[in-house]
Image: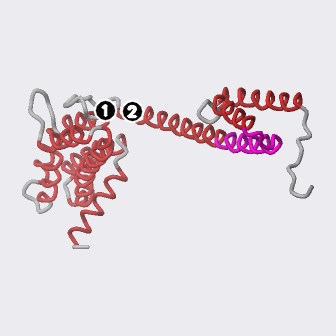
Amino acid sequence: MFGAKKKETLAASDKVAMLDKLREKYRKAQQQYGARLFDMQQLENRISFQRANQSDFQRFIIDEMNFFKQMQEKGDEEIAKRKRQEEADARMREIMAANDALIAHYPDVFFHPLATLECRRLVGAVSNLFPEIDADLRYVFQGRKEWGEISFYLADLERFIYKPPMRMTAFLAAYVAQIQKWGETGRDDADRKFLQTAAMCLTGITNELKTNLDALIDTDKARASAIIARLDAIVADFRLTDWAQHGLALKAQKKLGI
């Protein structure tokens, strides 16, 4: 009769075999993708619901296979994403290891347990560098017109000095306070500001020296060239060039009122 429900053509044994195959596919998929995507109990619940409602078995199997395929595709995407992340993490660890090797010869000044190794070693580098270059720069430039700009950068650089048991400078204390306040979420921003400030100070001094190098007598030129070499080495080892260029460009824009 027209509109009558189509009679099931599958034998009971065929249905059992198909369900067993579906269960086996789920078991294997669960091992590969996990129970979050392929939950055996949820599958059994759907099988029980189909039986209780005596719905179209073939339609049920088709729907289950389509659902299985969707979950499988989602699982493959998650695996691929996890693999990409693992590869990115591995590359980052390699880069960090290489970076750590570049700065390993600088003292690790443990001014606070929350400070990152890069920032601690930068403090060590500046703490060792500063007294020497301060004396040499005063000897060469004090009394000259360019001393004003050089002394400005020196004063900024002095904020990175820490030699136990001295107290932290206000700048170092502010860096620590930011990490203490925001924890891991604020560490990247705190480190960025820390490194950029150091980059601007070191590169600012270098730029001033390079600009005025030709105007110096030979002995002073030798002193200034030696300082440039030391400053350039720190900037290169700590990968501060980009930080310096960005920071100095912003400083120049502020001066021009842009």
Magenta stretch: dominant secondary structure: helix
* Mark 1 crowdedness (10 Å alpha carbons): few <14, some 14-19, many ≥20: some
Say if the magenta span includes residue 223. Answer: no
| Residue 122 figure quarter | top left
* Location of mark 1 (residue): 117
Question: What range is drawn magenta here?
Answer: 53-74
Q: 148 and 247: which one is in front?
A: 247
Which secondary structure lies at badge 1?
helix
Outermost residue on the bottom side: it is 257
Q: Quadrant of the C terminus?
A: bottom left
Whole-Å distance between the Cαs marked 1 and 2?
9 Å
What number is the disc on residue 176? Answer: none
**Type of the residue with mark 1:** Leu
Badge 2 amino acid: Asp
Q: Is residue 62 inside the magenta stretch?
A: yes
Q: Which label belongs to residue 100?
A: 2
Secondary structure of the residue carrying numbered label 2: helix
Q: Position of residue 235 (x, y in %)?
A: 32, 45
Asked whether the residues under the numbered discs 1 and 2 touch, taking CB atoms below 8 Å apart as contact, a structural biologist would say yes
Q: Quadrant of residue 18?
A: top right
Foreground of the two, 58 or 181: 58
Residue found 31% across the figure and 36% down from its top: 118
Please state, as top left, top right, bottom left or bottom right, where the N terminus lies in the image. bottom right
Q: Position of residue 195 (x, y in %)?
A: 29, 46
Q: Is residue 68 left or right of residue 156?
A: right
Answer few, some or many: residues within 10 Å of disc 2's Cα (few below 14, many 20 plus, some between 14 and 19): some
Residue 134 image point, x, y percent = 14, 44
| Residue found at x 16% / y 55% | 150
Of circles 1 and 2, the one toward us is 1
Q: Which residue is drawn at the image coordinates 32% and 29% (left, top)?
A: 105
